[in-house]
Image (cartoon, rainbow, N blue to C red):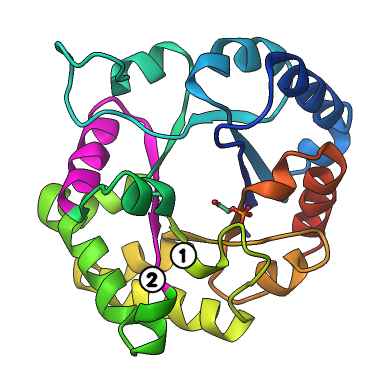
Amino acid sequence: MKPKIIAGNWKMQGSLQEITNLIREVCSNFDVLNSPSVQVIVFPSFVYLHTVHQLLQNSPVLLGAQNVNEHVAGAYTGEVAASMLKDMRCQFVILGHSERRHVYKESNELVAEKVQRALEVQLTPILCVGELLEDREKGRTEAVIQAQLQAVIDAVGYQAFQQCIIAYEPVWAIGTGLTATPEQAESVQAFIRKLLKQGGTELANKMSILYGGSVKPDNAASFLSVPGIDGVLIGGASLKAQSFVDICKVGIQS
Ligand code: PGA
């Protein structure tokens, strides 16, 4: 069985000191992090990548970034290129997070360009997809997710999904304390796999699909035990060492 992916998105939170303490405390649970049943990844802010990478030496925890620019390089003040993330030893990058799509108005096409940039330097995109509450209420969940995925398929083709992870994160469940039901998560992952089947059954079956949105130690098991859900993307609960490690433990048991 493939390991459950336990990914902590720290967003724009914490000071250097707090992030250092957090990673030290998390890493003191070496046996949990080193379990073959989980793959733990953390996503600090760009400015802390170097420090976190140093702190993660001799730890099985992998490193990722929260965003990347859509250009290869150039005069784009304030932006960060995929090759730079590679230089900083990132192996993953979160793309199309709902805060990028909805606060920073990133279109499906822009997200697709970013996926392309990441893949060019062998960074694994964690491509986030998910619907607004209004979309769900109007029965548009699948149409929204299909459009989000189709833009990426158009840009990079189906086969590139072999190098991607998808995170289903209903926008209304992020940071709100609300969660999708396990049935909703199961139905969306099945829909995503159905779409990707056009690129081959093996591709669709092998794809890692995560759930994200208000995952906590006490509800993690209900998602990690859903057939077809291969891990969780955690915001708030990843900022507390104990709750993050507790979710990793749930991953080991699931
Ligand atoms: P949350 O965030 O766990 O705080 O809801 C999830 C995310 O933004 O990926």
Q: Image quadrant of residue 177? A: bottom right
Residue 217 screen position, x and y as percent: 81, 59
Magenta range = 109-132
Q: In the rendered structure, which disc, 1 or 2, sits on the residue that comes first in sequence?
A: 2
Based on the picture, tell me whether residue 115 belongs to the magenta stretch. Answer: yes
Which residue is located at x 18 percent, y 44 percent?
110
Question: Viewer-proximal residue, 178 or 119?
Answer: 178
Disc 2 marks which residue? 131
Q: Is residue 117 above or below residue 157?
A: above
Give the spatial CA distance, label 1 vs label 2.
6 Å
Asked which secondary structure carries label 2, the reply is loop
Q: Position of residue 45 (x, y in %)?
A: 53, 25
**Residue denoted by label 1:** 171
Q: Which of the two residues, 2 or 140, is positioned nearer the viewer here? A: 140
Label 1, residues with CA under 10 Å away: few <14, some 14-19, many ≥20: many
Q: Which residue sits at x=68%, y=60%?
A: 215
**In the rendered view, would you say 63 is above or below 141?**
above
Name the amino acid, label 1: Val
